Amino acid sequence: MATITFIHPDGSSETIEAPSDESVMDAAADNDIDGLLGECGGNAMCATCHVYVVTSEPLPEPSIAEEGMLDTTAAPRRENSRLSCQLFLDQPATLEIPDEQ
């Protein structure tokens, strides 16, 4: 299990517990976290689950598919951009949800 804190564009935050075998996007959906659309269902094909990783232990590098999709995000890509559908966490993390997907 990982404790994940989501920071919304308005500055409010929500914290959930997520199983390590579930993507952050799915865990967010299961816990009614707004702002992560996930239109492709977690297949790294739409970039509508874009997040900024604010704090976390080092994460695995993004796959080639994720790297390609991060170039198409609606909100500006940053060095700490990731697709939440591709993140599986077993450590605490704080993620910022962009103001647009």
Image: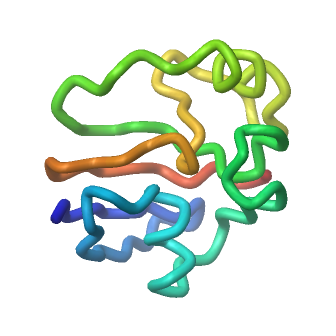
Q: Left or right of 13: which side holds 39?
A: right
Tell me what residue is drawn at x 26 percent, y 57 percent.
Answer: 20
Q: Look at the picture and state if 41 lies above or below 74.
A: below
Q: Look at the picture and state if 21 lies above or below 10.
A: above
Q: Left or right of 48: which side holds 92?
A: left
Most extreme residue toward the front, as rendered?
21
Of residues 94 and 32, the one drawn nearer to the viewer in this rendering: 32
Residue 2: image location, x then y, percent: 19, 60
Tell me what residue is drawn at x 44 percent, y 43 percent.
Answer: 87
Residue 63: image location, x then y, percent: 56, 19
Q: How is the image coloured?
A: rainbow
Please give the count of numbered marks on the rendered protein: 0
Could you tell me which quadrant the N terminus lies in?
bottom left
Of residues 24 and 95, the one drawn nearer to the viewer in this rendering: 24
Residue 27: image location, x then y, percent: 44, 71
Of residues 63 and 52, the one drawn nearer to the viewer in this rendering: 63
Q: Look at the picture and state if 89 lies above or below 60.
A: below
Q: Left or right of 22: which side holds 33?
A: right
Tell me what residue is drawn at x 45 percent, y 56 percent.
Answer: 23
Of residues 100 and 23, the one drawn nearer to the viewer in this rendering: 23
Q: Left or right of 59: which side holds 12?
A: right
Residue 36: image location, x then y, percent: 65, 63
